[in-house]
Every structure is written in structure tokens, then in C-alpha cells.
Image: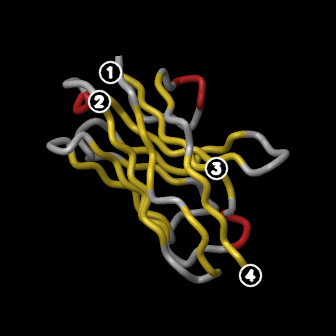
Amino acid sequence: QVQLVESGGGLVQAGGSLRLSCAASGRTFSTHAMAWFRQAPGKERDFVAAISWSGGSTDYSDSVKGRFTISRDNAKNTVYLQMNSLKPEDTAIYYCAATRWRPISRDSKEYDYWGQGTQVTVSS
């Protein structure tokens, strides 16, 4: 069982940066692929970025590629999402997700554990 707690969200002006963190409980964090998804009001939950258990593989949605960077520190049981050049359309609740012994995926159904989410608001 893995519990995930996101932090780092907030209000930022367009063009600014934020770094989200997702702290995981449990000793098996290093065996889990991790991902970030986001959900804007009235919209479906969308894939943002994912990272393999080793950190050797990453994937990004086209909308954030080149602006966002996902990383992880297995010693700290934490995954990060560095968000630069933020745009108003990045406004959403950002969720951290984990899946064990599976490759990274853009499909939310592949992830077994979810955090409660953290709000990111980008003003124009």
C-alpha cells in the first residue's frame, strides 16, 4: 500500500514557475512508476508526465513538453514536477499517481494509487 501526498501548488502569474512534490509512504516506492495528471474544472483528468521506477524513462504530454520536468528521488520517496513558463491553461488540480511493477503509461486506469491533489492557478 502506498499513500501519496502532493504539495507545492499555488497561485502564480503567467510565465512563472512552480515545483510540485509528491511524498510517498512505504518502503516500495522505488518499485513504482510515478505520474502526474491534472484536471481542470469541467474537464476530464489528463496525463501530464510520467517517470519509471528507476528514473531512466520519462514521458510528457505535448502540451507541457519542454516546459515541465518530472524527476524523482527514491532515497526521499518523492517525485517532483518542475513547471516553468506556466500558462493560464495549466490551471488545474494536479494529482500524483503510482503503479507498481508496470511501465509508465498515459492511461490513468493503469495507476493504483492517487494523492488528494494540489491546486495550481496561473493568472494572465
Whether the residues at callouts 1 and 3 have beta carbons within 8 Å, the answer is no
| Secondary element at image label 3 | strand
Residue 25, by quadrant, is: top left
The residue at which mark 1 appears reads as: 101
Q: Earlier in the sequence, mark 4 or mark 2?
A: 2
Q: Which-is-in-front pick, marks 2 and 1?
A: 2
Count neighbours of disc 4 (C-alpha within 10 A) and say few if under 14, some if 14 to 19, many if 20 or more: few
The answer to whether the residue labelled 3 contacts the one labelled 4, judged by CB atoms less than 8 Å apart, is no
The answer to which image quadrant residue 78 occupies is top left
The percent position of residue 7, horizontal first and vertical second, equals 44, 52
Structural distance between the alpha carbons of marks 3 and 2? 21 Å
Q: Which mark is residue 25?
A: 2
Residue underneath mark 4:
124
First along the sequence among labels 3 and 2: 2
Q: CA distance from mark 4 to mark 2?
A: 36 Å
How many badges with numbers are in the image?
4
The quarter of the rendered structure image containing the N terminus is top left
Q: Residue furthest left?
A: 75
User: Label 1 is placed on what type of residue?
Assistant: Trp
Q: Which residue is mark 3?
A: 93
Measuring 28% from the left and 49% from the top, which residue is drawn there?
A: 72
Which circle's residue, 4 or 1, is located before the other in the chain?
1
Residue 49 relative to residue 47: left or right: left
At 59% from the left edge and 32% from the top edge, which residue is drawn?
107
| First in residue order: circle 1 vs circle 3 | 3
Measured as percent of width and height from the top left, residue 58 is found at: 39, 49
Tag in front: 4 or 1? 4
Name the element at disc 1. Answer: loop
Task: Decide: few, some or many residues near mark 1? Use Cα within 10 Å; few <14, some 14-19, many ≥20.
Answer: few
Q: Relative to 1, is 84 above or below?
A: below
